[in-house]
Image (spheres, rainbow, N blue to C red):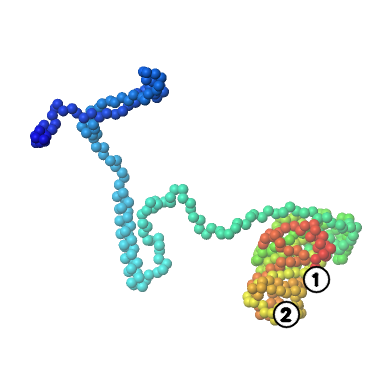
């Protein structure tokens, strides 16, 4: 114990030159072909021999490498300066705003372009690769482009030896209307079999040689087109006010001269037939044939039961008495929508019926005409009648 205290009391003897330095060892496995080493006593494998290499490098006395300075990064001083300038601009903007509000000269249409913009990561421009928002983009489903249907060749069972009036023959050939044909006949511009005809009521057959201005005239093939008429469209072949007509909607459908059967008001929508068959047109429009028409009517207020009864029994208008063949509400929970069936072809007859009773028609749509409907036919589109539909119209199968 005394010796130990003596050693501790001598600090100069704690580290002497004769003292052995500390040895740092690391284990390195020896190379072997199979990872195992055979013993000298047999073939029994033994563990690999481990070799320890002494090193006096403890890491304490090794000098450290020189200090590497940190890489310099671009300064953000410009960004902070821009923020400071923006803050000063906003301060001036706020002072101007408060001064105008105090004086009462502040306008809600304040120019927002004068307001300073805060600097940000995208102040220089939009983010690369970002999507641009399109303002006022159309909503809803996109309507597919209209593809005109293929024309249909209708079979005609006409006796070529059957005679008909000359003006009707010219009208069926697409030269002009019957009234205009009478003017051409009186002017001596029509020849039949080489002779000029000026007498009205002259009759010809399809076998005769009829010419207009030296050009032969022959009857055209029949064309039948069903159109779902849109709003703001007039039912005429030509409008002096250059408004849109039903003929503009079916332009290019055929080379024959066609015209609408009957008329619909400019703001009335629904089915309308366009054809060059004059005989069928007369049957569909003449009141004696009693072709059925069904309208869907939207009114400004609910229709009372008493008024519905009056329309069914008949009311007196300025041009005579009129009554509906059938009348009903379209929806049970909305009495302002009425369906009316009528055979009369008077001008604006449906509107005048309800206006006579104090109602205002907001919307009028013809959904049925002589067996033809607008099923699968969008507004403003048209299609050719099928062979069966044409046969039904010729035979009068639909009222």
State left or right for residue 208 relative to residue 232: right
**Numbered disc in front, either 2 or 1:** 2
Number of residues whose C-alpha sits closer than 10 Å to that of mark 2, classed few (under 14), some (14–19) or many (20 or more): few
User: Nearest the camera: 210 or 55?
Assistant: 55
**Residue sitting at the far right:** 161
**Image quadrant occupied by the C terminus:** bottom right
Q: Residue 272 placed where, x, y %? A: 73, 64
Q: Which mark is residue 96?
A: none
Confirm whether residue 213 shows in the render. Answer: no
Res 180 quadrant in image: bottom right
Q: Tag 2, which secondary structure? A: helix
Q: Which mark is residue 309?
A: 2
| Residue highlighted by disc 1 | 290
Q: Tag 1, which secondary structure? A: loop
Q: Residue at x 82, y 64 (%)?
A: 397
Q: Residue at x 29, y 42 (%)?
A: 72
**Image quadrant occupied by the N terminus:** top left
Res 63 quadrant in image: top left
State left or right for residue 288 relative to residue 305: right
Number of residues whose C-alpha sits closer than 10 Å to that of mark 1, classed few (under 14), some (14–19) or many (20 or more): some
Q: Residue at x 80, y 71 (%)?
A: 290
């Amino acid at each position: 114990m005394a010796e130990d205290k003596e050693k501790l009391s001598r600090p100069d003897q704690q580290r002497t030159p004769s003292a052995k330095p500390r040895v740092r060892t690391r284990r390195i496995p020896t190379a072997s072909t199979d990872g195992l080493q055979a013993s000298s006593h047999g073939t029994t494998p033994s563990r690999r021999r481990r070799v320890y290499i002494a090193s006096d490098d403890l890491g304490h006395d090794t000098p450290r490498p020189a200090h590497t300075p940190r890489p310099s990064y671009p300064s953000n001083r410009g960004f902070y300066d821009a923020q400071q300038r923006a803050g000063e601009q906003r301060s001036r903007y706020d002072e101007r705003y408060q001064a105008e509000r105090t004086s009462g000269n502040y306008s809600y249409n304040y120019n927002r372009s004068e307001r300073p913009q805060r600097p940000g990561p995208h102040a220089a421009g939009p983010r690369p690769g970002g999507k641009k928002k399109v303002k006022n983009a159309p909503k809803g489903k996109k309507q597919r482009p209209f593809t005109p249907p293929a024309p249909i060749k209708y079979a005609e069972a006409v006796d070529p030896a059957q005679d008909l009036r000359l003006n009707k023959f010219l009208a069926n050939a697409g030269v002009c209307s019957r009234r205009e044909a009478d003017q051409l006949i009186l002017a001596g511009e029509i020849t039949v079999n080489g002779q000029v005809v000026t007498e009205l009521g002259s009759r010809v057959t399809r076998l005769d040689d009829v010419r207009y201005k030296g050009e032969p005239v022959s009857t055209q093939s029949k064309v039948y087109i069903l159109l779902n008429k849109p709003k703001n469209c007039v039912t005429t072949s030509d409008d002096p006010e250059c408004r849109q007509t039903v003929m503009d909607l079916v332009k290019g459908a055929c080379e024959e001269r066609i015209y609408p059967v009957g008329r619909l008001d400019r703001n009335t929508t629904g089915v309308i037939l366009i054809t060059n068959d004059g005989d069928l047109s007369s049957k569909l429009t003449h009141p004696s044939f009693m072709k059925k028409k069904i309208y869907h009517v939207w009114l400004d207020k609910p229709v009372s039961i008493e008024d519905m009864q009056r329309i069914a029994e008949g009311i007196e208008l300025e041009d005579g008495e009129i009554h509906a063949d059938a009348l009903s509400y379209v929806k049970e929970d909305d009495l302002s929508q009425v369906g009316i069936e009528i055979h009369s072809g008077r001008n604006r007859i449906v509107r005048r019926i309800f206006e006579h009773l104090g109602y205002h028609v907001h919307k009028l749509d013809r959904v049925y005409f002589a067996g033809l409907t607008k099923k699968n036919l969008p507004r403003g589109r048209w299609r050719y009648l099928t062979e069966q539909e044409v046969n039904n119209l010729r035979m009068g199968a639909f009222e």
